[in-house]
Image (cartoon, rainbow, N blue to C red):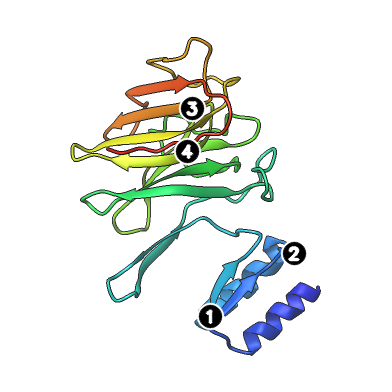
Amino acid sequence: QKMIDAFKQAIAAKPDCIEIMGHPGEDAMAPLVDQAEAAGIVVTSGNNPRMNIIAKLNPSGSLVYSMAVNGSGAGPTPISGYPSGLTLTSQIAVDTLGRVFITGETSQSDFPTTSDAFERQLTTSVNDAFLAVVNSSGNGLVYSTHLRGADNGVALALDKNGNVYLAGNVNATQTFPVTSPISSSGGNIFVAKYSGIGGTPDLALTKSHAGSFTVGVNA
């Protein structure tokens, strides 16, 4: 209740921005966040991300659109270091048509997917990598899918021919759709390629790696 009262007092003070630290629950906070935003107050979150937002600004810095790309329900277990039921974007890319490609990780069982998705269900015991494509108007999904057996997507790139490249971490105990293995014993790094948008990756491979590592894509 103290947090709710503090939020109400903050709104009454009419600041430019309010940052939320902690979270007493969506039912309690959502109406207050809506009230603050309606009053022109920017609301951000600190240690508890609220929504996975994709936003576009014009050259003068004005908002063109913003869109949440996440579900609402909690997954079976939390993403490490965060409350359960979150979607986090790791990287984005924009094609020549203005469509926004995003990858990251989700532990939400109702993460939005499209009918032509490679996988529509949460498939790992912790969280899934995902690929989503937001249309150029920022009001809908062109494509969205879980990446079966992959824990998180950490890198994404597009080439001039419209191919989509993804890389990240894969859970070796799950069924990842390997088409070109470069490790005889499974792996914990994945690379996948889509030639266009939709369906199943045209190329997917895994590689075992011990210790820490970084993954990137340059296309």
| On screen, residue 48 above or below 33 | above
Q: Residue at x 53, y 19 (%)?
A: 175
Task: Report the residue marked by disc 2.
Answer: 24
Task: Report the residue marked by disc 1.
Answer: 41
- Give residue 44's quadrant in the image: bottom right
The kind of residue on which mark 1 rests is Ile
Name the mark nearer the viewer: 2 or 3: 3
The kind of residue on which mark 2 rests is Pro
Residue 198 position, x and y percent, is: 33, 34
Outermost residue toward the bottom? Answer: 13
Task: Report the residue marked by disc 4.
Answer: 153
Task: Look at the image and tell me in which quarter the C terminus lies.
Answer: top left
Residue 168 position, x and y percent, is: 47, 34
Q: Secondary structure at mark 3?
A: strand
Q: Nearer the viewer, residue 12 or 60?
A: 60
Separation (CA) of disc 3 from disc 1: 42 Å
User: N-terminal of the two: label 3 or label 1?
Assistant: 1
Q: Residue at x 27, y 72 (%)?
A: 59
| On screen, residue 64 above or below 125 | below
Task: Report the residue marked by disc 3.
Answer: 189
Q: Are marks 4 and 3 in contact (CB under 8 Å)?
A: no
